[in-house]
Image: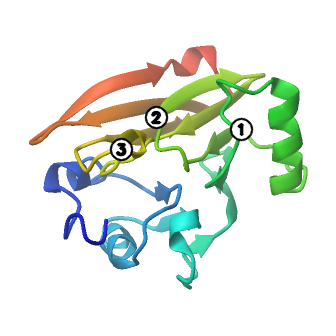
Amino acid sequence: MPGSIEELWPHALEIFKDASYILHAGDLHTLDIVDRLSDIAPTYVSRGNGDVGIVDERLQDTWILDLEGITIGMIHHFPSPLRKSASHLEKHLDKNFDGKAIDVVVYGHTHLEDVRAVSDRLYINPGSPTLPRNQLLRPGTLGMLELDDSHVTATIYQLTDHSVIYHEEIDPLRHPY
């Protein structure tokens, strides 16, 4: 965001108004946005390659969060489930999350939004609200996880210049945890 826009668009922040937690998959470049998001809900950030030198307890390389009975592993750089086999993904999970059973993986790095279930695990890359697909500054995407009675619904929202529209959802009944 630095050098591109001063603040995240208000309609993007509106999506988080009722959030219990905010997860950021990295590349924030400045703590300003973490401070703003932390005003809304507890915020956790996976340190991205664009976050070198930023020191704050809300930034870690990886997170293992137990939220509402769901174990979420969050990391910035992770192989794309679209391009890699389930066994390849498992190796990376074991390496980065010390063999802990993870229900949902939240990752970033590519800025390519994706929601995918592989081997009874949900993977979500929310994309980027400000630099979608790692291209030009423009409204991009945000992800939302709804956790309810050990079920997960993952939704990707597309930002426009002045609003937010629904984009893609994984049905929680197909992916109970």
Residue on which disc 1 sits: 103
Instruction: Say which amino acid is labelled 2.
Output: Glu
Front residue of 170 and 96:
96
Examine the image and state in which quarter residue 4 appears.
bottom left
Looking at marks 3 and 1 on the same chain, the residue that comes earlier in the sequence is marked by 1
Across and down, in percent, residue 106 comes to 59, 45
Examine the image and state in which quarter residue 22 appears.
bottom left
Residue on which disc 2 sits: 113
Q: Residues within 10 Å of mark 2 (few under 14, many from 20)?
A: many
Front residue of 72 and 91:
91
Residue on which disc 3 sits: 135
Residue positioned most to the top = 174
Across and down, in percent, residue 164 comes to 20, 36
Instruction: Say which amino acid is labelled 3.
Output: Gln
Looking at marks 1 and 2 on the same chain, the residue that comes earlier in the sequence is marked by 1
Residues under numbered marks 3 and 1 in contact, where contact means CB atoms less than 8 Å apart = no
Across and down, in percent, residue 118 comes to 72, 23
Image quadrant occupied by the N terminus: bottom left
169 left or right, relative to 88: left
Looking at marks 2 and 3 on the same chain, the residue that comes earlier in the sequence is marked by 2
Q: Residue sitting at 28 percent across and 26 percent down?
A: 166
Q: Residue sitting at 88 percent across and 52 percent down?
A: 95
Q: How is the image coloured?
A: rainbow
Q: Secondary structure at mark 3?
A: loop
Viewer-nearest of labels 1 and 2? 2
Distance of mark 1 from mark 2, alpha carbons? 19 Å
